[in-house]
Amino acid sequence: MSFSFSDTIRITIFGESHGEAIGLTIDGLPCGIPLSREDIQKEVNSRRGDENLATARKEKDIIHFLSGIYNGFTTGGIVSLLINNEDVHSESYQKGVIRPSHSDLTAYLKYQGFNDYRGGGFFSGRLSALFFALGEISKEVLNYYGYEIKIMSHLINVGKLNDRLFSSNLNEDYQNLLNKKIKVLDDKFQQDIKEYIEKLKNLGDSCGGSVETIIINPPKNLGEPYFDSFESKLSHLLFSLGGVKGVVFGDGEEMSKSLGSEMNDQLEYQNEQIKYLSNHNGGILGGITTGEPIIFKTFIKPTSSISLKQKSIDVNEKKNISLEIKGRHDVCIALRMPKLINNLAYYVILDLFMKDKVAR
């Protein structure tokens, strides 16, 4: 089974966590666009983040480019690539044993028990490695068309630990985050996270988190009214990531408790240019980008795989069980999300840019 998104720059992903490989195809890229295989591989490698805080599963993630790129340029054909699965430990998974808060039961019922349950099969976060390649390709195509868009994300919170929000000095914040493996603005927060994750690991527990993202210099006029609004397209993709439970744009939380006089983004002419005096709507009005920075937050639940005893069921034996989950799992999947969210955002911008380009 494969899964596809969009009809403009159409992507399809396929594969399973413990299968031979995972793969990505990208259909709709024009010919003659320079793409760097080295930079795409470098971005996929960055997925590992701080390996001391991540799952013990260590994949090489070497990309095998199959088609669509020749001599460093897109050919006009479908760009396709594979990443092999090499470090799999399938013995940690038992058929019919349902892990609480995973997709195990819904997958079992929907696919009548024929789904690959090892590592979550095609529900696994393993497939998110493909989005790092997708994001870098999207970024390079946007650069080709003259858009130097900066996207940065940081952890707002990990469990009950909190980072500060983005400041008014976005370029300084961007440089601050650039080479950090743990994407936080406050350096003290970085050490606090390490200690907190180690504590939870020893307890056999996990935690959730949230991420703030800002897109600097986005193109204006991206998005279509109603079903292809910028918010709906990006949210659609973000909710495809395992563990994402909420997405809020701009000051959405505060807006629900505020007055229009407090939250309307007023305007004026400055040197014959239209200027927004605030950005409470997060750079999007009517589903269309205004050119102001796009700001949104993503909320991620605690990692479902914990080693504490939990009540569950065995659907093969049709009995109740006490379950202690074994295997290799992140204590906090939110730690992986900042760069992953950035890469999906680059793709959404490219997809809507090409849709607008064709329409005009």
Image (cartoon, helix red, strand yellow):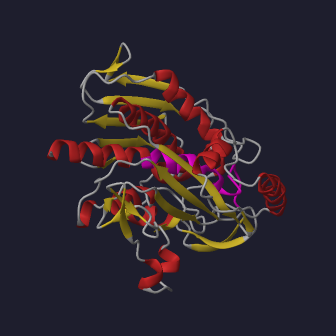
Where is residue 89? Give x, y as percent: 64, 41
The single residue placed furthest to the front in the displayed view is 271
User: Which quadrant of the figure has residue 302?
Assistant: bottom right
Residue at image x 46%, y 55%? 293
Image: 61 above or below 212:
above
Left or right of 308 in this view: 70: left
Where is residue 166? Give x, y as percent: 61, 58
| Picture quarter with the C terminus | top left
Where is residue 42? Give x, y as percent: 56, 28
Q: Point out the stretch of residues depicted in magenta.
A: 325-345
Residue at image x 56%, y 68%? 317
Please name whichever residue, 325 or 306, is drawn nearer the observer in this view of the structure. 306
Q: Is residue 49 visible?
A: yes
Left or right of 20 in this view: 328: right
The single residue placed furthest to the top in the displayed view is 71
Our reading of the magenta stretch's main secondary structure is helix
Please name whichever residue, 337 or 293, is drawn nearer the observer in this view of the structure. 293
Left or right of 92 in this view: 103: left
Image: 28 above or below 250:
above
Magenta-colored stretch includes residue 333:
yes
Image: 285 above or below 65:
below
Residue at image x 54%, y 45%? 126
Magenta-colored stretch includes residue 336:
yes
